[in-house]
Amino acid sequence: MTTQTGNEISLSLGSYKYEEPGLMSLKGLKSGIELRATKAYSARLTFLRGELRYAGGTVDYSSNSTGSSSGEPDWYFEGRALIGRDWLLKTATISTYTGLGYRFLLNDGRGITSTGHAGYRRESTYIYLPMGVIFRTGLNSGDEMIGSLEYDHLLSGNQFSKLSDTGLGYSDLDSKQTEGYGMKLRLSYATARWSAGPYLHYWNIADSAINPVYRNGVLYSYGLEPHNKTTEIGFELRRPF
């Protein structure tokens, strides 16, 4: 039940919700694909792992102040480099790991909402420190149950709002983020040929720094990326290759 050297591919489908509480929300479905490569050093019970994930779909925008729109393209890419160690118990194995993660998201909100407001593109970048634990236990059938819990500490974040997309003369807004965290939960039933189960990804990011916004070259106001939460819940199927 220790971590094994090998490659895996997974396909997923889940519900996605991004919200700025009291201000706006984006909701939709995202399908994803993930590649994972693991190199295990059994003599030392340690392992190295690399992960690449892409998930995308369309989302519906809703806001009390600027109306609604539907079918906005929304996708993200995530890359992670991890190092971990196995800890052997009597009937189970616990694996702890840490590393470095990178996440880039693009939401294309260009167009006109139901109340006549112009939308724009948003680019989101997170660099974070993942810290997680994986629990494996064997079943009488020879298969395994695997559960994992991960905490992600935001090291650096950036929100780039392309306000110039509105065509109203606004400058783009570049907002730095320094406070926030994420969580990842997984539970799966695993055989020698496949594994499957539910997952939860969650982010909670604090208000960004405040920056000036110009209109036609003249200082117009100040803006920030508000406190926001992202929740993704779905089901994935994974296979070694």
Image (cartoon, rainbow, N blue to C red):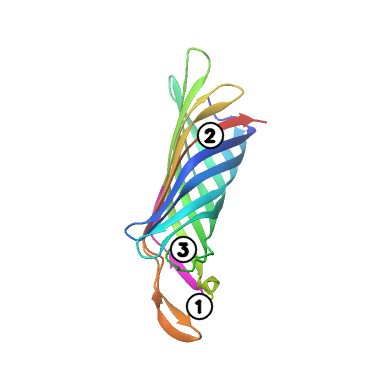
Residue ID for mark 2: 236
Tag of residue 113: 3
Counting from the top left corner in percent of width and height, residue 178 is at: 41, 63
Of 5 and 80, which appears nearest the observer? 80
Of labels 3 and 2, earlier in sequence is 3
Q: Quadrant of the C terminus?
A: top right
Q: Amino acid at mark 2?
A: Glu
Using the numbered discs, state the Cα–Cα distance from disc 3 to disc 2 in whole angstroms.
34 Å
Q: CA distance from mark 2 to mark 1?
A: 43 Å
* Residue depicted at 33% across the width and 57% down the height: 21
**Which span is picked out in magenta?**
169-182
Can residue 196 be seen here?
A: yes
- The residue to which callout 1 is attached is 168
Task: Return the disc, 2 or 1, that comes first in the chain's sequence.
Answer: 1
Q: Which image quadrant for residue 177? A: bottom left
* Mark 3: few/some/many CA within 10 Å (<14, 14-19, 20+): some
Q: Position of residue 20 (x, y in %)?
A: 37, 58
